[in-house]
Image: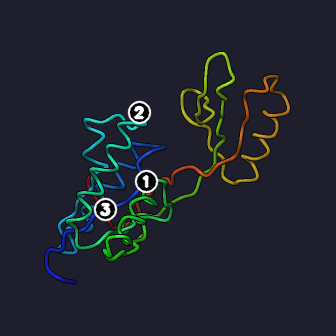
Amino acid sequence: MSENKLVYIASPYAGDIQKNVEFAKAACRYAMEQNCTPVAVHLLYPQFLDDNDPVQRESGFHMGHRVLEACDELWLCGSRISTGMTMELREAKKLGIPVREISAEQIQGGFTMEKKYGVWAMRSAGSVCGAAQSWCKHGGKPMEFDTMEQAESYANQLNESCYSPNVRYAAKEMEPELNQGSGFSMRM
């Protein structure tokens, strides 16, 4: 690899923001270990932009695309490609910037990713309270299931017992949990 390439780190942000930020930081450290200079705008822009505000989110994408123009490569990090990452990928291709796929295993070394599933609750705009989306929670934490089938079964039970046409439930894969393997440590 060429010395000190400027690489644009693309990884998910929305969802479990804390875990996604930890993963993005790990991706930046990995890039440094590869003798590259990482740029992760999704670690910077949420410090002063509201990702939930469509106008501010769009501004973040425009600024990010401007930063991408200066980069030598775009690195797609992890197995899940978010909407924002798809836009960054499209822009990199348009600009002729090389794209590399970097697996979570490469980034995390001794870390493995454990799949978990949850139930996503969706309230439509037709509701008196307005539109909203969230994980179904128990004790303040999102409920987790080991298989998609378990999550689907629970979502179906909720849909059958729900009396509002404005609320629906669906099984969905959650952001992977980081589990440290033996003999390796990494500070976040």
Q: Nearer the viewer, residue 50 or 103?
A: 50
Task: Specify the label residue 9 is tagged with.
Answer: 3
> Where does the image place residue 47, in percent across and percent down from the top left?
26, 37
> Where does the image place residue 157, in percent across and percent down from the top left?
82, 36
Please state if 40 lies on the left or on the right of 128 as rendered: left
**Secondary structure state at the residue bearing disc 1:** helix
> Where does the image place residue 78, in percent across and percent down from the top left?
44, 64
**Secondary structure state at the residue bearing disc 3:** strand
**Secondary structure state at the residue bearing disc 2:** loop
- Could you tell which of marks 3 and 1 lies nearer the N-terminus? 3
Rendered view: 14 above or below 80? above
The residue at the point 32 percent across, 43 percent down is 59
Which quadrant, please, contains the N terminus? bottom left
For the residue carrying disc 2, how many other residues have a C-alpha within 10 Å: few (<14), some (14-19), or many (20+)?
A: few
Residue for badge 1: 84
Label 3 and label 1: CA atoms lie apart by 12 Å
Residue for badge 2: 53
> Where does the image place residue 115, in percent across and percent down from the top left?
58, 57
Which residue extends farthest top? 128
- Could you tell which of marks 3 and 2 lies nearer the N-terminus? 3
